[in-house]
Image (cartoon, rainbow, N blue to C red):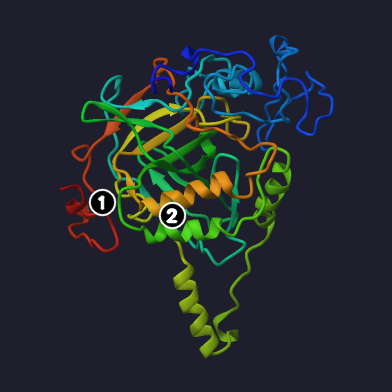
Amino acid sequence: GPPPLGGGGAKATVRDGATSNTGTNMDGTAVIRGTARPTPAPTTAKPTLPPAFKDPNMPYRPQGYFNYDPFDGYYGPVAWSKWFPGCGVGVTEFDQSGVGIEGSIGDGRQAPIHLGEDGMNVECEATHEIRTRAAEFSLCDDEAGLFSITPSRLRLDFTAKNRNPWTDLPDGFGAMDAKYLEIAYPAIHTIEENGRRKRYDAEYTIVHDFERRKKATLISILIDATGFRNERFQDLLDEWSKVDTCRTPANEKQFFEEIHRFDRRKLRAEPPKEHQQPETQDDTTNKHRDLACAFNIYHRTLMPSTYYYAYQGSLPEPPCTYKDYLPGTSEWRVINKPMKISPEQLEQLKALVEFGPCKDSEFAQDMGVWRARPVQESNARSYWQCKRDSFPLDCEKDGYCDCDAVLCPEDFA
């Protein structure tokens, strides 16, 4: 049966030769072992094959392959740090501005951790809610975002420079652009509910780039598939349903170039008002279309609370680092109230990952129940929770809450 959710990846029992292919490539050709140096773009880490992995029984897998099987001592979570060093270590000290000190690499402050009261060692010092702006992101604008599917994730990269959605986190972060969002199933994190450890059906994670302090900042929302149809979530699923190419380490460079192609373009300036043409019926139709296509990734039906659990860790799957930033410096904010979707939407999400364009890829994962990284040790990291009584909603400070547009006190009754 499956191992317990807690306890960290290092405690899993390793079984040698966990997969069935023991000596040949997928096409039956001879295997050349000991040459893989998986480095999915855009990370700059270049891990080399450790001597312990020069094992004649090690099954061949393509460069950059990994899986979630806790009993696979070659490619599972217990082996990730051997292939991807960022999955095993983390920064332990920071300077006064919050930037990681490069020489302070120690035991990994990895993600995910279990979310509960135990282990909290810092008080919430936030003074305002997580502030967000949809900016000009549109589902109908091919230059605004790139939808893709990996062997384990649904992903949306934001590609329109100066027009990406952004958030303003408390604790001195300021505004940060969203770079991409991912949906994983089941949920990445476990959470304490009614004295029991629970893993929700899926998790929706938005990754932001905090360039000033060289760290990624992630806002993550657990997904509960016992609700009604979530129309905004369905809009995203419909876009992923159009994807016909599997995104893997083998073609990551092509995706990386496509994502940054629009980043480099100059935004078109609006002509002076005196030179603008009178509005036509087509212009009016286009405006209605733009309104229908506008999409807020932080909408209250997708992010139903502004209160959260907070800790510092890694990205949740290899290479576990963002860009060339130091390992273990990613800031997590996991919203304390789950998003609701319907059971049918969860089935569609699963089908896109399992039976979509990655189904026949050499990177495909027959993961069965193994689809989430085991919970990691706390390793003396800061961990806290901001609750309803930690700070008031912004609209409460303003004296008026438009409950159709923003979160209101009634949402937390």
Q: Let me know if residue 179 appears in the view.
A: no
The quarter of the rendered structure image containing the N terminus is: top left
Counting from the top left corner in percent of width and height, residue 320 is at 56, 29
Q: Is residue 141 above or below residue 5?
A: below
Q: CA distance from mark 1 to mark 2?
A: 19 Å
Q: Earlier in the sequence, mark 1 or mark 2?
A: 2
Specify the amino acid type for callout 1. Answer: Asp
Which type of secondary structure does the marked residue at label 2 adopt? Answer: loop
Q: Residue at x 39, y 41 (%)?
A: 201
- Look at 67% across and 41% down and name the residue there: 248
Count of numbered circles on the image: 2
Report the residue that reaches farthest toward the left: 413
Which amino acid type corresponds to the residue marked 2 in the rendered image?
Ile
Q: Nearer the viewer, residue 169 or 191?
A: 191
Residue at the outermost top position: 52
Q: Secondary structure at mark 1?
A: helix
Is residue 151 visible from the viewing direction of this image? yes
Q: Which residue is mark 1?
A: 394
Report the front residue among 271 and 388.
388
Q: Residues within 10 Å of mark 1 (few under 14, many from 20)?
A: some
Around disc 2, counting alpha carbons within 10 Å, would you say few (fewer than 14), some (14 to 19), or many (20 or more)? many
Residue pointed to by mark 2: 297
Left or right placement of residue 147 versus residue 384 in this view: right
Q: Residue 401, percent across and down?
A: 21, 59
| Residue 143: mark in rendering | none
